[in-house]
Amino acid sequence: MKITHQHRFAASIDQVVAMLQDQDFQRARAESTGAVSVDADVDVRSNGAFTAVARRLVPTGSIPAEMRSFLGKELTITYTEAWEAPDGDERVGTFAVDVAGAPGHVAGAVSLRPAGDGTEFLATGDAVANVPFVGAMIEQAVARTVERAFVAELAAADAWLAR
């Protein structure tokens, strides 16, 4: 199932990148999704490329009831963004969402580009669950959950940038 999420930041790309490279922001971003425990790491390379990884423990109360029997009471979710070195005015990278013990995952592309006096964020990807009979249902549930997480995380980003 395809996922597309767009957001406009009221900040420059440099400000958005600085935020994404901040380990405290990555922790706050993960906490905005209801995580009860978060571990965040950011690795910035000398060429400006960077990878941000947030591992979070999330209660399953927010997912559809029919899925909870497969997953238990809590999920360990790892969200990774790998951004390439700057090349002109835009930044591009990839993202992946892995849920420990779950039969599905999400992966795709992310980008930042100038938009007037702000920055446009775009995430596109696919939710995939290779499970007979219920794969499509799992993909829909995973896609909806990731889209809700993007909304919460990007609201946390706006608040971070407004500080």
Image (cartoon, grey):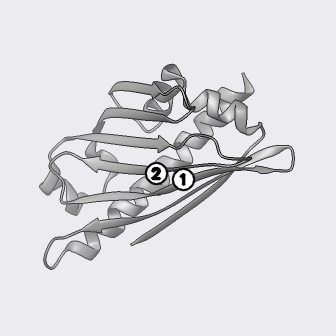
Helix, strand or loop under label 2 = strand
Q: Which residue does the image show at 45% across and 42% down from the upper left?
A: 82
Quarter occupied by the C terminus: top right
Element assignment for label 1: strand
- Asked if disc 2 and disc 1 are in contact, CB closer than 8 Å, the reply is yes
> Does 35 appear above or below 69?
above
**Could you tell me which residue is drawn at 44 percent across and 26 percent down?**
42
**Label located before the other in sequence (2 or 1):** 2
Q: Position of residue 70 (x, y in %)?
A: 13, 56
Residue 6, image quadrant: bottom right
Q: Quadrant of the N terminus?
A: bottom left
Is 42 left or right of 55, judged from the image as shown?
right
| Residue 77 placement, left or right of 82 | left
For the image, the number of numbered tags is 2
Amino acid on which disc 2 is placed: Thr
Image x and y of residue 15, in percent:
71, 30
Q: Which quadrant holds residue 48?
A: top right
Q: Give the camera-side residue of 25 and 138.
A: 25
Q: Residue furthest front?
A: 47
Q: Residues within 10 Å of mark 1 (few under 14, many from 20)?
A: many
* Above or below for 144 versus 76: below
- Of residues 22 and 64, the one nearer the viewer is 22
In the image, residue 31 sits, relative to residue 69, either above or below, namely above
Mark 1 residue type: Val
> Which disc is residue 110 wearing?
1
Residue 11, given in percent of the width and then of the height, sits at 77, 36
- Residue where numbered disc 2 is placed: 94
Q: Residue at x 21, y 63 (%)?
A: 66
Furthest-right residue in view?
A: 116
Point 86% across, 50% down: residue: 116
